[in-house]
Amino acid sequence: MSTRPPVHVSEAEMAVQRDSMCRIAEMPHRPQTYHVVTYGCQMNAHDSEKLAGMLEQMGLTAAPDREEADFVIFNTCCVRDNAERRALGNVTWLKEIRKVRPEMMIAVCGCMIQEPGMAERILKQYPFVDLAFGTANLHRFPSLFERVLTDRQRVVSIDGDDVIAEDVPVRRLRGDAAYLTIMYGCDNFCSYCIVPYVRGRERSRRMADILREAEALRDTGVKEIMLLGQNVNSYRGEDGEGFPQLLRAVDALGIERIRFMTSHPKDLSDDLIAAMAECEHVLPQFHLPVQAGNDDILRRMNRRYTRAEYLDKVRRLREAVPGIGLTTDIIVGFPGETEAQFADTLSLVDEVGYDSAFTFIYSPRTGTAAAKMPDQIPAEVSTERIQRLIALQEKRQREQMTRFVGQEEKVLVEGLSRRSDRQVSGKGGHGISVTFPGNEKDIGQIVPVRITGLKNNTLSAERKES
Ligand code: 5AD
Ligand code: SF4
């Protein structure tokens, strides 16, 4: 946890940004349409909603296809090499479109831009990029964009402090479910992870600001709120309020469904477990990234918990919230990982029985401690290991899912099922996908169902007469 108080962007600075947005809106030759391409995590997805919010205040409207937009923004991720390569590949691909539509403008922003050396690389190797800016100055996007439009010059801006900007306009993608950031940055420095370098030091929003935003969302009919932070358990309000206290306060607002992510196992407290059990609207689901099942690997990852401690927290969560949906993140092929150490990860996955797991092959990130460790694992070894891990997880997932058959769930419908337009799908309270008969009218509604069986890693259900 940071010892410095968080720095909020001043009202005067936000007024400068609002003025920029107004002036851009008045410009006759500005781009008319925009398209934001998002990579990476929920934090980034929410940042893209803020970009869209600011663009709409500047008078631009959303274009469904990037090829047709006047202004395309790539909001990038750099947590693994493939996310980065995909983003850069797509930026380059757009260069070709611009040969046919020379008026098209291109911006690149997000975590990747904060990486050391990336700004210089964009300047040199990507001359068709008009604007590049990092996560540290997302709230300054209007004034940066205005400079590009008025000076007709490229702008690359990565400087900026670890601040909190309140009242940035947001255009939410969904009307029924909303992201709500409670804290920014990360101080954990897990040895493989680049996030603390690109997202800066941990800083928490004021509890009053969070509650005000949650109330406003409730009043517009939002049914589900996802509280976001790289490590929500180290939330500290201005008066020292912890995450369990915040969760209880959000719960009291009467929003139907509340979720949160991500929790670091080392900081998962008994009080949070108690709050989960107590709070009526907090859903019975928990994302608890384990990363590895071997103590030596966990130590070298700088995770600061042991396998036994992790398993104990899982046990306590399950005791307090019976049937809780449990998900995780796992990395295979961490430097020096032996077959026996990997076998410990397999046995942990077998023992816990997750409802879902995000599995990743370790990707060395320049500047992190693990990138300098000896014994980097060859790609073919990691690939073979991840396949075994996925096979085991799929088997355990199917076994775990059977516990829901015959039970009742409430599903927030996200859309038509990919397989049939007479079926809809969404997430139940446990966070697991459920498919059942329905139509477009159900989208955005919470529908009570009875689970009837399993189909391709999702649950199938019938509507419950209510
Ligand atoms: N290589 C592979 N996976 C990573 N993650 C973070 N950094 C790396 C990396 N260098 C994974 C972790 C984390 C998730 C968001 O991404 O599992 O929990
Ligand atoms: Fe990365 Fe670890 Fe922070 Fe998560 S807790 S963002 S894995 S450093």
Image: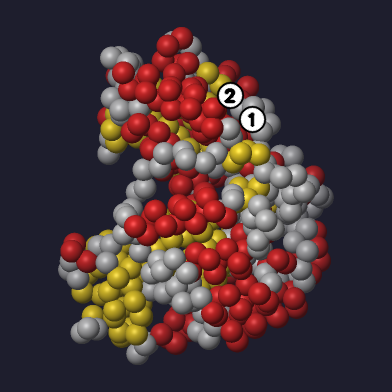
Tell me if 170 is positioned left or right of 343 in this view.
left
What residue would you read off at disc 1? 160
The circle drawn on residue 157 is 2
**Can you give x and y, in whole percent of width and height, for residue 309 in the image?**
75, 76
**Can you give x and y, in whole percent of width and height, for residue 252 in the image?**
47, 69
Is residue 98 visible to the viewer in this orientation of the structure?
no
**Can you give x and y, in whole percent of width and height, for residue 376 in the image?**
75, 51
Q: Secondary structure at mark 2?
A: strand
Ligand 2's image quarter is bottom right
Where is residue 429, by image quadrant? bottom left
Q: Quadrant where the C terminus lies?
A: bottom left
Tell me if 39 is positioned left or right of 189 in this view.
left
Asked if disc 1 and disc 2 are in contact, CB closer than 8 Å, the reply is yes
Q: Could you tell me which residue is drawn at 39 percent across and 63 percent down?
A: 224
* Residue nearest the viewer, comparing 20 with 454: 20
Amino acid bearing label 2 = Ser
Tell me if 45 is positioned left or right of 464 in this view.
right
Amino acid bearing label 1 = Gly
* Residue nearest the viewer, comparing 196 with 460: 196
Disc 1 versus disc 2: nearer the observer: 1
Q: Could you tell me which residue is drawn at 47 percent across and 16 percent down?
A: 147
Separation of marks 1 and 2 at Cα, in angstroms: 9 Å
Q: Is residue 88 above or below residue 106?
A: below
